[in-house]
Image: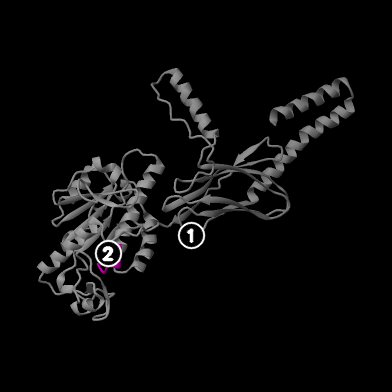
Amino acid sequence: MTVGYFCAIGIAVIFMLYMDGAIGVMMLAFLILMPVLSLIMTLYVRNKIRISLKLPDSAAKQRTETAVILLEKDTPLPMPFLRLILKTDAHFAPLNPNAKEPPPRPSSDGSLIAKLNYSKWRKNRRTMLTPDALPLCLALSTEREAEYRIPVTTRFCGAGTVSLEQVQLSDYFSMFRFRLPLTCAETLLVTPDIPELKAGNALFRTVTTAVADADEESESAPVSSASATPGYEHRDYIPGDSLKRINWKLSSKRRHLMVRKDEPIAVARLSVVLDFRRDLRELPPETRLRTEEELIETALGFLMLCAKYGYPCKLSYADQAGAWNSISVENPEQLTVESINLLRGGCRPEEALSGLPVIPPELMQEGSALLLFFTTHTGANTMTALERFPKPLYLAVPEQDADQFTVPKNGSLWLVTAEHQLLQAGGES
């Protein structure tokens, strides 16, 4: 546009000198005054513009939601062109699925050729389209506000971010551009799909058997489940239940074993820890989020299974403020609500949780009978801290990272698969 405009001015000068001076002067004045007027109006309007971004608070996975861009101005003058980029993180499907991934950064050895290659790469990186970025050009005529709706599709559970970046205002002739100090970023919480694990799960059988054995060996006063009504609520017998809890009279009538839920249950004997420290390795964002999602959803599915069969657990995780939060999960409905709270913080770099011990101190002090620890963190300090736990330990890690972990001396190693199964390393499924 700018080059063509200067060519038009040159033609007007030639017309003025060699054809008709009066008309040439008028043409030249018009071509010079119009950009100046456009620049003045643009400078005036740029202080009258407001832009905001709106998203729903939460959404399920694989669902298309709408990102609403609200554009407002405090003047009846038409607004010039507003250019910006709508960008999403890896929690969402690509906005530009046909765009190419940016090329890798060229290596630099300090030579002149290497510096030129890096300069070229940096320039192309700023201008090229990427799958997670959608360029937009917006405008307003005499109306004071307008909404622009852009569909975004959720992909992985967690706190997804949608932002407006590189906001620029150009004049009516696109000859001048001004960067506006407007940055908008909103978070949409993508809720997990809690899988339905079966009672025949090997880890569930192992844990419930160990809890039952710990109950029988304990001499402490029994603690009843908060969800139980003495003498009335029952559930089906599952392997690992103590024979003392079977209601033989009711079992003979129904012709299968029934367990009374008002019998002693070790509320604080099974502790589940979700380690939100992010793996230190350099991984593609999609791979990292997929692995974290598999681990979180499997942990929630296991807790849901325990709550369903009357085995209340203590769940511990790092909250949004970076402190340990522990709750007793006794029913599925409670876990559904808590799954939203824990994802507000979600997995974070280790630096964000540097002051947090690997295991909540209260679990070390209470001496819980069992600890089920879900993690993707491959650091050596994780294994060191876990081996200090005085009671049996079950370590659950992503299956693809099995070679990064060793079997704890005080427990066993379990692998989380993409299908939300829990397989013992070198054992049964």
Pinpoint residue 370: horizontal percent, then vertical percent: 18, 59
Tell which residue pokes out farthest to the bottom in this image.
231
**As rendered, which of 378 and 147 lies closer to the eye?**
378
Q: Can see residue 225?
A: yes
Left or right of residue 280: residue 10: right
Q: Nearer the viewer, residue 11 or 99?
A: 99
Query: Which image quarter holds the N terminus?
Result: top right
Q: Residue at x 20, y 80 (%)?
A: 249
Give the crowd class for mark 2: few <14, some 14-19, many >=20 residues within 10 Å. many
Where residue 282 appears, as percent x and y from the top left, is 35, 38
Q: Which residues are magenta?
A: 305-314
Image height check: is 101 above or below 275?
above
| Residue type, mark 1 in image | Asp
**Res 323 seen here:** no
Q: Which mark is residue 140?
A: none
First in sequence, mark 2 or 1: give its number: 1
Q: Identify which residue is drawn at 90% across, 24% down.
A: 20
Q: Position of residue 112 (x, y in %)?
A: 45, 18
User: Where is mark 1, residue-wise?
Assistant: 57
Q: As shown in the figure, which amino acid type bears the numbered disc 2?
A: Cys
| Residue at which label 2 appears | 306
Q: Is residue 263 magenta?
A: no
SS of the residue at dot 1? loop
In the figure, 406 relative to 3: above or below?
A: below
Residue 313 is one of the magenta-drawn residues: yes
Q: Nearer the viewer, residue 206 or 282?
A: 206
* Position of 288 relative to 187 (above/below): above
